[in-house]
C-alpha cells in the first residue's frame, strides 16, 4: 500500500508492506526448527547459526489494559506469554499465546514475553485491513525482544508487524 500527502507544498510518500499469513495453531510444534518459524533469515555463508545473546530481560509480570472503544479488558498472564480478553460483562472471550500461535522465531531472547500493550496505530490498522480485505479492531503488543504486532480484539489473532 502506498500513501502520499502534501504538507506546506511538499509531497511526502510512505510505502507499507505487510506479510499476512494464517496458521492452524493445532498443527504447530514448538519450538519450530530454523526455516520453519516465520521470519527466520539464515546467516550469511561462513557465519555460524548461533543464537543471539539473551537480553537481560525483566521477569514476566502480569499486565492489564482496557480498550476504551470496545470495553474489552486484556490481561497478560504471569508467564508473560498468554494474553486473555475479557468482555465488559466479565466473560472470557479468548486466551492466546501470540508468539507460539504465529510461529515467530526467537529474536534477541530465547523466550520473549509481552511487556507492553497499547492502542494500535491507525496507519498500521489501515495497512492490515487493506491487506486482509476486512475490518480489524486491534491493540498493539510488544515483546521484550523488540518484536511487536497487532492483536485482533474479536478473535485474538496476532499479526506480526516487525522487530528492531
Image (cartoon, grey):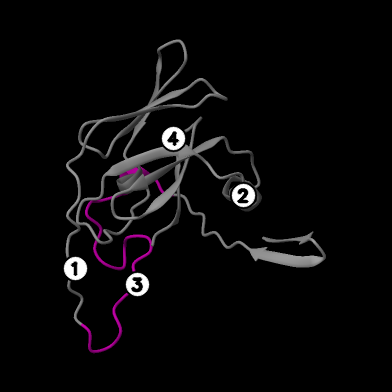
Say above or below: 163 vs 47: above
Give the labeled residue for mark 1. Answer: 51
Examine the structure image and report whether residue 31 is included in the region drawn in magenta: yes
Task: Identify the mark nearer the N-term, 2 or 3.
Answer: 3
Residue 133 location, x and y as percent? 65, 47
Spatial separation of the CA atoms under disc 1 and disc 3: 12 Å
Q: Residue at x 61, y 44 (%)?
A: 122
Residue 63 location, x and y as percent? 31, 31
Q: Nearer the viewer, mark 4 or mark 2?
A: 2
Task: Identify the mark nearer the N-term, 1 or 3.
Answer: 3
Examine the structure image and report whether residue 79 is included in the region drawn in magenta: no
Q: Nearer the viewer, mark 2 or mark 1?
A: 2
Spatial separation of the CA atoms under disc 2 and disc 1: 33 Å
Say above or below: 64 vs 5: above
Give the labeled residue for mark 4. Answer: 156
What's the magenta region?
A: 23-47
Residue projecting furthest to the bottom: 46
Task: Identify the mark nearer the N-term, 3 or 4.
Answer: 3
Label 2 with label 1: CB-CB less than 8 Å: no
Give the labeled residue for mark 3. Answer: 41
Spatial separation of the CA atoms under disc 4 and disc 2: 20 Å
Res. 123 mark: 2
Q: Residue at x 80, y 61 (%)?
A: 8
Q: Secondary structure at mark 2?
A: helix
Residue 131 location, x and y as percent? 62, 53
Amino acid at each position: 500500500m502506498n500513501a502520499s500527502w502534501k504538507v506546506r507544498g511538499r509531497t511526502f510518500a510512505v510505502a507499507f508492506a505487510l506479510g499476512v499469513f494464517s496458521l492452524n495453531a493445532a498443527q504447530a510444534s514448538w519450538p519450530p526448527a530454523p526455516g520453519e518459524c516465520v521470519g527466520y533469515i539464515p546467516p550469511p555463508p561462513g557465519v555460524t547459526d548461533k543464537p543471539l545473546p539473551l537480553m537481560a530481560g525483566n521477569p514476566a509480570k502480569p499486565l492489564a489494559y482496557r480498550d476504551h472503544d470496545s470495553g474489552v479488558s486484556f490481561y497478560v498472564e504471569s508467564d508473560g506469554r498468554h494474553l486473555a480478553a475479557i468482555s465488559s460483562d466479565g466473560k472470557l472471550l479468548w486466551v492466546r499465546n501470540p508468539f507460539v500461535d504465529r510461529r515467530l522465531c526467537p529474536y534477541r531472547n530465547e523466550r520473549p514475553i509481552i511487556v507492553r500493550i497499547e492502542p494500535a496505530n491507525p496507519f498500521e490498522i489501515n495497512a492490515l485491513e487493506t491487506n486482509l480485505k476486512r475490518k480489524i479492531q486491534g491493540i498493539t503488543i510488544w515483546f521484550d525482544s523488540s518484536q511487536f504486532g497487532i492483536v485482533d480484539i474479536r478473535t485474538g489473532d496476532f499479526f506480526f508487524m516487525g522487530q528492531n
